[in-house]
Image: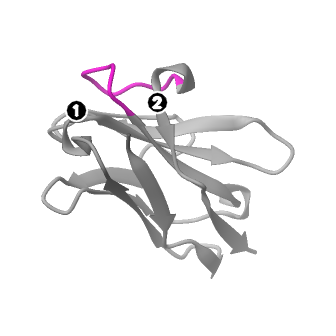
């Protein structure tokens, strides 16, 4: 069993940056593929970025490519989402997720076995 706790959300202005963290505990989470997803107002939760266990393989949604960067520190069992040049439309609840079943990055929610509770990020114009 893996427990995931997100942090780092908050209220910022357009153009600002935020770094979200996802602390994992339990099991061998450092070997899992990790992902970040966002639930935007009025929409279903959607994929933002994912990283494999070593950090050498990443993938992003087109909407965030070039602005968001996912990384991980396995010594700290923590995954990060660096969000730059934030826009009001980036306002969402951000979730991290862990997959024990796939060995590379994945955009598919069905591949993820564990989810955090989410952290709210609000970008004002």
Picture quadrant of residue 81: bottom left
Q: Main secondary structure of the magenta part?
A: loop
Q: Secondary structure at mark 1?
A: loop
Q: Is residue 18 visible?
A: yes
Left or right for 84, reference 120 = left
Instruction: Decide: is 117 above or below 105.
Output: below
Q: Is residue 102 magenta?
A: yes
Residue 34 lies, in percent from the top left, at 36, 39
Residue under numbered circle 1: 57
Q: Which residues are magenta?
A: 99-108
Say which of 115 and 92 sits in front: 115
Q: Is residue 9 magenta?
A: no
Q: Secondary structure at mark 2?
A: loop
Q: Nearer the viewer, mark 1 or mark 2?
A: 2
Say which of 91 and 85 sits in front: 91
Labels 1 & 2 near each other (Cβ < 8 A)? no
Left or right for 54, reference 84 = left
Residue pictured at 80% horizontal, 39% vertical: 43
Residue 106 lies, in percent from the top left, at 40, 25
Q: Is residue 84 visible?
A: no
Question: Colour mode?
Answer: one colour
Residue 94 lies, in percent from the top left, at 59, 54
Query: Which of the two discs, 1 and 2, labels the residue nearer the N terminus?
Result: 1
Picture quadrant of residue 49: top left
Label 1 vs label 2: CA separation?
A: 19 Å
Residue pictured at 49% horizontal, 73% vertical: 8
Residue under numbered circle 2: 113
């Amino acid at each position: 069993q893996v427990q995931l706790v997100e942090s780092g959300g908050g209220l910022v202005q357009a153009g600002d940056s935020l770094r979200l963290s996802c602390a994992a505990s339990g099991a061998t989470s450092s070997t899992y593929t990790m992902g970040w997803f966002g639930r935007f107002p009025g929409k279903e939760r959607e994929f933002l970025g994912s990283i494999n266990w070593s950090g050498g393989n990443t993938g992003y949604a087109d909407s965030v490519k070039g602005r968001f960067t996912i990384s991980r520190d396995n010594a700290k069992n923590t995954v990060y989402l660096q969000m730059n040049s934030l826009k009001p439309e980036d306002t969402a609840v951000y979730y991290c997720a862990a997959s024990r079943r796939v060995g590379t990055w994945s955009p598919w929610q069905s591949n993820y076995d564990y989810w955090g509770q989410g952290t709210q990020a609000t970008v004002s114009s």
